Image (cartoon, helix red, strand yellow):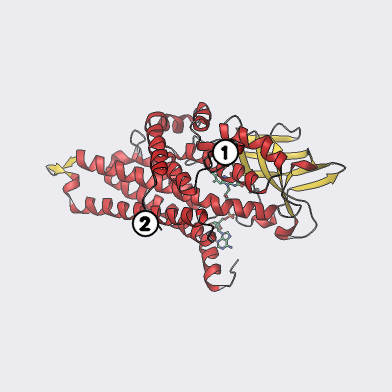
């Protein structure tokens, strides 16, 4: 693996870095307090090409590689995880699934709008009763002439109240488990589809997270993406790549922790000297730095495997597991460097800790990734 960035990759990272420093970081605390990022950010992300980074140019994307996607995601995560999540879901889970599995008509209908930011996508897999055990979801789509009629509910859906389309997973067959699941592209203005914003989250407070309830929502059969019964494959392939994006976002959080801790340690004086001179403070900073570097390399490895067409699912679980736990550790260590000031929201590290915490929960919890890695290594499923 070549660890040197190409000129193009370095340029896209610089573009993202400048954008985040100018348009994201200065507003992140206010958006967190207001429980909503400024919706205008979506258009700006689209204008810069960040919402279509890895989508082919013929569908309005930039045709970029996955390392470039990681670099942009890291920068967005450094600025505000709520903003990073918009891209990880709308591009990473929805647009990329349409590009991989959609019909030509579906690609033409949705990809240019998702890439430009004119439309936002969300990913509807989790339900109130099924989280880790997603293959047992109960939302049902019943064939009625040329349509499907969908009934059920989805929980914790990122971008939920903002989205124009939901990539929705529902049971179409009688078979239990993953075999009876199909995937649909459901416009969110479909009659019978209702969205309720979930308030009071510990972190990612700027993000529009919703419960989506479907009560007889009718879509044409052409809304099905991929063949009937292949929905779970659509979901799992989206998440395998999506986890790389979560991991990159965690690297961004960890880098923000490192930057904040180094700056503060140089300014704050105790016992007549900057706290940076105390060895135990240096230990906190060194621990953060090691986590940043290790998480970044594991994440880049996934991008490298995807771009070279190598297997990447276990690498993706490894990077997501490590980077999410590392982001929590780094934020906790950074907060320690800030002392009591870390505990009030005038300073950035408390938000970084709250935003980091959910990374160990979604797109597979830490425990689920240990089981995935364990299964790959031993050949034995412990689910
Ligand atoms: P559960 O599955 O009930 O797990 C509870 C605990 O049990 C966890 O510690 C888990 O690790 C453990 N556990 C479960 N099974 C096992 C096992 N076999 N062995 C060992 N331990 C086990 N979902 C979407 O579909 N789309 C989204 O956009 C989306 N965005 C989200 C945004 C936020 C802010 C949050 C909080 C969640 C989001 N989710 C989304 C849902 C997320 O993916 C789920 O919360 C996650 O899969 C865990 O499911 P659960 O919350 O039901 O927990």
Q: Under 8 Å from ligand 1: the CB of mark 1?
A: no
Q: On the picture, is 47 further left or further right than 137? A: left
The correct choice, above or below, for 349 with respect to 367 in the image is: above
Q: Quadrant of the N terminus?
A: bottom left
Whether residue 374 can be seen here: yes
Q: On the picture, is 246 further left or further right than 6? A: right
- Residue 17, position as x, y percentages in the image: 38, 37
Q: Residue at x 61, y 40 (%)?
A: 122
Whether residues under marks 1 and 2 lie with C-beta atoms below 8 angstroms apart, the answer is no
Neighbor class of circle 2 (other Cα within 10 Å; few <14, some 14-19, many 20+) is some
The correct choice, above or below, for 280 with respect to 35 in the image is: below
Q: Nearer the viewer, mark 1 or mark 2?
A: 1
Q: Nearer the viewer, residue 122 or 357?
A: 122
Q: Secondary structure at mark 1?
A: helix
Q: Quadrant of the C terminus?
A: bottom right
Question: Which residue corresponds to mark 1?
Answer: 57
Question: Which residue corresponds to mark 2?
Answer: 294
Q: Quadrant of residue 379?
A: bottom right
Q: Secondary structure at mark 2?
A: helix
The correct choice, above or below, for 331 with respect to 376 in the image is: above
- Residue 147, position as x, y percentages in the image: 82, 41
Q: Residue at x 56, y 38 (%)?
A: 61
Q: Nearer the viewer, residue 343 or 89?
A: 89
- Residue 167, position as x, y percentages in the image: 66, 43
Q: Residue at x 77, y 42 (%)?
A: 222
Q: Earlier in the sequence, mark 1 or mark 2?
A: 1
Neighbor class of circle 1 (other Cα within 10 Å; few <14, some 14-19, many 20+) is some
Give residue 246's mark: none
* Real-space Cα separation, disc 1 to disc 2, in angstroms: 33 Å
Q: On the picture, is 298 further left or further right than 189? A: left
Q: Residue at x 52, y 70 (%)?
A: 377
């Amino acid at each position: 693996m070549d660890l040197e960035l190409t000129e193009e990759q370095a340029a896209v990272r610089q573009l993202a870095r400048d954008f985040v420093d100018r348009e994201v970081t200065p507003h992140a605390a206010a958006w967190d307090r207001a429980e909503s990022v400024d919706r205008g950010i979506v258009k700006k992300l689209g204008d810069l090409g960040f919402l279509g980074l890895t989508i082919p140019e013929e569908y309005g994307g930039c045709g970029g590689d996955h390392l470039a996607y990681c670099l942009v995601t890291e920068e967005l995560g450094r600025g505000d995880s709520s903003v990073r999540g918009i891209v990880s879901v709308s591009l990473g889970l929805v647009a990329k699934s349409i590009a991989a599995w959609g019909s030509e008509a579906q690609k033409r209908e949705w990809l240019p709008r998702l890439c430009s930011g004119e439309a936002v996508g969300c990913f509807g897999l989790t339900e109130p009763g099924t989280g880790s055990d997603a293959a047992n979801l109960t939302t049902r789509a019943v064939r009625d002439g040329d349509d499907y009629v969908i009934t059920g509910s989805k929980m914790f859906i990122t971008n939920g109240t903002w989205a124009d389309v939901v990539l929705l997973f529902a049971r179409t067959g009688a078979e239990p488990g993953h075999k009876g699941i199909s995937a649909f592209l459901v416009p969110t203005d479909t009659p019978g589809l209702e969205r309720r914003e979930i308030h009071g989250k510990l972190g990612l407070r700027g993000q529009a997270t919703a419960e989506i309830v479907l009560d007889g929502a009718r879509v044409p059969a052409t809304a099905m993406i991929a063949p009937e019964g292949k929905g779970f494959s659509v979901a799992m392939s989206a998440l395998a790549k999506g986890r790389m994006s979560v991991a990159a976002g965690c690297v961004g959080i960890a880098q923000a922790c490192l930057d904040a801790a180094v700056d503060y340690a140089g300014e704050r004086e105790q016992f007549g000297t900057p706290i940076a001179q105390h060895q135990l403070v240096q230990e906190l900073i060194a621990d953060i730095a090691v986590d940043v570097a290790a998480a970044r390399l594991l994440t880049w490895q996934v991008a490298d495997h995807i771009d070279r067409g190598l297997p990447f699912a276990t690498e993706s679980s490894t990077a997501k597991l490590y980077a999410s736990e590392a982001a929590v550790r780094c934020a906790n260590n950074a907060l320690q460097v800030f002392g009591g000031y870390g505990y009030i929201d005038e300073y950035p590290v408390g938000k970084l800790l709250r935003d980091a915490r959910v990374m160990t929960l979604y797109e597979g919890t830490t425990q689920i990734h240990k089981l995935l890695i364990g299964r790959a290594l031993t050949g034995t499923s412990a689910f």
